[in-house]
Image (cartoon, grey):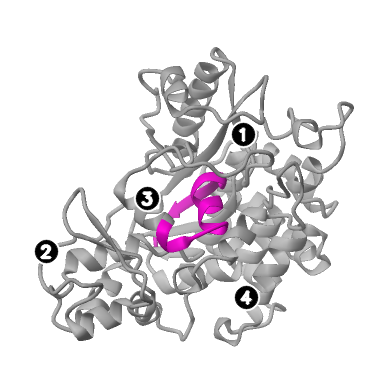
C-alpha cells in the first residue's frame, strides 16, 4: 500500500493541506488487505501482574515465518503488522506469525490476551520515548493513560479501490454494526465497566478534535483537509529526539495562519503536516489506503473472522450493497450527530441492541456469500459461519462471554476458548 510522501518544505497556505488530503484518497487498482493486531500480554499464572517488556521480548522467536513486523505500544502491548496482500495470503502469513509468537510466549509462561481493554491491571506505561511523554501530557488522566497502556485493537487496512469515496462511505456507515459485532472489552478493574466495548468508551473520552468521526459533506478529501486543519496540535517535532508539547488548544490551522506556535517561531512544513496526521485517530483514517480503527482485539484464534468480514463488506461490491441497505435505517448524515449516537449505542450495547443485531445478521450473510469470491477457503468460511451462529444470531457480542462467571468465579479468565487467553 502506498503512503503519502512527506517533505521538509514550508507550507504556503491551506491549499497545500487540501493537496495533501487529496493524495490520501488516490484510487487503487489493487485490492489488498493489511492487518495490524494488538495484544495485551499476561502471565498465565498471575494475570494481574504487569509483564515486563524485556520478558516479552526475550520470549519472542528470533524470526517470524510470515514476515510480520513486531512493535510495542506504550503499555507493553504487542503489535504484529502483517504484510499486505490478497485476503487468503494476508491471513495465512499473519496466522503463522501469531502461532509462532504464542508458542514462544507459552514456553515462558506468558499468553496473548484477546481483549480490547485490560480487564484487571491498572494503566502503567513501559515505554518512555519523547513522543509518548508528550502524548501522555496532552491526553491526560485517566483516559489518556488507559488508551496508551490498556487498550488493544485490530486495525484492518484496505486499498481504496477505483472509487475511494464509496469505500470511505462504506467504512463509516458499517462502523456501528461491525463495532457491535466484535465488541470485546466489557471489563475494567476486574468488573463490568458498563460498555460492551470499553475500549471504544475510552476513545470517546479523548480529545474529540482528533478522535471524532470525520464529518461528511460528500467530498472526503475536503472533509479530511478540514479535519487536519481544525484538530488541536498535540506536539511539534523539533528534531528526532525532541518534541515540543502544545497545550494551549492551538490547531494546525492556527499554526499555518500565525506562522508560529507554542513558543516556536518557524512556520509548519509539509513534514509537520504529515506527522500531525499520525497523531489523529478518527475511527476511519485515510493514508493512501483506509485504516479501519474501531475494532476491538479478539481472541488470538478468532481475529481472522473480524478481518474477513470487514474486508468483504467494504471491498466486495455485492456484499457492500446488501450491507448498506441493511444499515440505511440508521439516522444520517454524520454531521447531524445522530450517527454519533449510533456509534455510542454500538459500543455500549453491542449486539444486544435489536437494530444492530438485525443489521449484523444481514451483513454476515452477505459476507459469507462474498468470501469465496475473495478467495477464502472453506475453513475460513466455516469460522465466520460459526461466529455468526454463536454471536450474531443470538445477539451476544463476544464481550458477553467474558462477563459470565465460570467455575472459578473469575469471569474474565473463563469461557469458550479459554476466555480471552
Q: Earlier in the sequence, mark 3 or mark 1?
A: 1
- Asked if disc 1 and disc 4 are in contact, CB closer than 8 Å, the reply is no
Q: Is 192 left, or right, of 308 in this rendering?
A: right
| Residue 176, quarter of the rendered image | bottom right
Label disc, if present, on residue 340 of the rendered structure: 4
In depth, the one of 83 and 78 nearer the eye is 78
Residue 153: give x, y in percent of width and height.
55, 48
Q: Which element carries disc 2, helix, strand or loop?
A: loop
Q: Which is closer to the viewer, label 3 or label 1? A: 3
For the residue labelled by badge 4, is the local secondary structure a helix, a strand or a loop? helix
Residue 246, compared with residue 15, is above or below; it is above
Identify which residue, 192 or 155, lies in the foreground. Answer: 192
SS at mark 1 in the image: strand
Give the label, 4 or 3, closer to the camera: 3
Which quadrant of the structure image shows residue 352? bottom right
Disc 2 marks which residue? 8
Q: Residue furthest front?
A: 263
Q: Is residue 331 magenta?
A: no
> Mark 1 — residue?
113
Can residue 262 be spotted in the picture?
A: yes
In reply to whether residue 156 is colored magenta, the answer given is yes
State the extent of the magenta-drawn residues as a range.
Answer: 137-160
Quadrant of the image for the C terminus?
A: top right
- Disc 3 target residue: 132
Between the C-alphas of marks 4 and 3, the distance is: 28 Å
Whole-Å distance between the Cαs marked 3 and 1?
A: 23 Å
Sequence-wise, the earlier of marks 2 and 3 is 2
Amino acid at each position: 500500500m502506498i503512503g503519502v510522501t512527506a517533505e521538509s518544505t514550508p507550507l504556503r497556505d491551506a491549499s497545500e493541506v487540501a493537496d495533501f488530503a487529496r493524495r490520501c484518497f488516490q484510487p487503487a487498482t489493487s485490492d489488498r488487505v493489511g492487518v495490524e493486531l494488538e495484544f495485551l500480554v499476561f502471565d498465565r499464572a498471575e494475570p494481574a501482574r504487569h509483564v515486563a517488556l524485556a520478558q516479552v521480548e526475550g520470549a519472542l522467536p528470533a524470526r517470524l515465518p510470515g514476515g510480520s513486523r513486531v512493535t510495542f505500544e506504550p503499555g507493553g502491548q504487542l503489535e504484529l503488522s502483517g504484510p499486505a496482500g490478497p485476503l487468503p495470503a494476508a491471513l495465512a502469513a499473519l496466522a503463522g506469525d501469531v502461532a509462532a509468537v504464542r508458542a514462544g510466549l507459552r514456553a515462558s509462561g506468558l499468553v496473548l490476551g484477546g481483549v480490547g481493554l485490560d480487564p484487571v491491571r491498572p494503566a502503567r506505561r513501559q515505554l518512555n520515548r519523547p513522543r509518548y511523554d508528550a502524548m501522555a501530557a496532552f491526553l491526560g488522566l485517566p483516559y489518556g493513560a488507559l488508551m496508551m497502556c490498556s487498550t488493544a485493537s485490530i486495525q484492518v487496512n484496505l486499498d481504496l479501490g477505483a472509487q475511494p469515496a464509496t469505500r470511505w462511505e462504506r467504512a463509516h456507515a458499517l462502523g456501528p454494526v461491525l463495532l457491535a459485532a466484535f465488541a470485546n472489552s466489557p471489563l475494567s478493574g476486574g468488573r463490568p465497566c458498563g460498555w460492551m466495548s470499553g475500549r471504544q468508551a475510552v476513545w470517546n473520552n479523548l480529545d474529540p478534535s482528533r478522535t471524532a468521526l470525520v464529518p461528511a459533506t460528500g467530498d472526503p478529501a475536503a472533509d479530511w483537509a478540514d479535519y487536519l486543519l481544525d484538530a488541536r496540535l498535540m506536539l511539534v517535532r523539533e528534531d528526532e529526539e525532541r518534541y515540543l508539547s502544545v497545550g494551549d488548544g492551538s490547531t494546525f490551522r492556527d499554526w499555518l495562519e500565525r506562522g508560529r506556535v507554542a513558543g516556536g517561531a518557524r512556520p509548519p512544513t509539509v513534514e509537520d503536516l504529515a506527522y500531525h496526521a499520525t497523531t489523529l485517530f478518527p475511527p476511519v483514517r485515510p493514508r493512501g489506503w483506509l485504516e479501519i480503527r474501531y475494532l476491538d482485539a479478539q481472541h488470538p484464534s478468532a481475529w481472522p473472522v473480524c478481518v474477513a468480514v470487514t474486508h468483504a463488506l467494504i471491498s466486495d461490491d455485492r456484499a457492500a450493497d446488501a450491507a448498506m441497505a441493511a444499515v440505511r435505517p440508521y439516522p444520517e448524515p454524520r454531521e447531524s450527530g445522530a450517527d454519533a449516537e449510533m456509534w455510542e449505542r454500538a459500543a455500549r450495547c453491542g449486539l444486544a441492541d435489536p437494530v444492530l443485531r438485525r443489521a449484523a445478521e444481514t451483513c454476515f450473510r452477505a459476507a459469507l456469500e462474498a468470501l469465496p469470491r475473495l478467495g477464502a477457503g472453506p475453513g475460513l468460511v466455516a469460522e465466520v459461519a460459526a461466529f455468526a451462529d454463536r454471536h450474531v444470531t443470538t445477539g451476544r457480542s463476544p464481550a458477553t462471554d467474558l462477563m459470565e462467571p465460570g467455575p472459578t468465579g473469575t469471569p474474565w479468565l473463563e469461557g469458550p476458548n479459554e476466555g480471552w487467553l
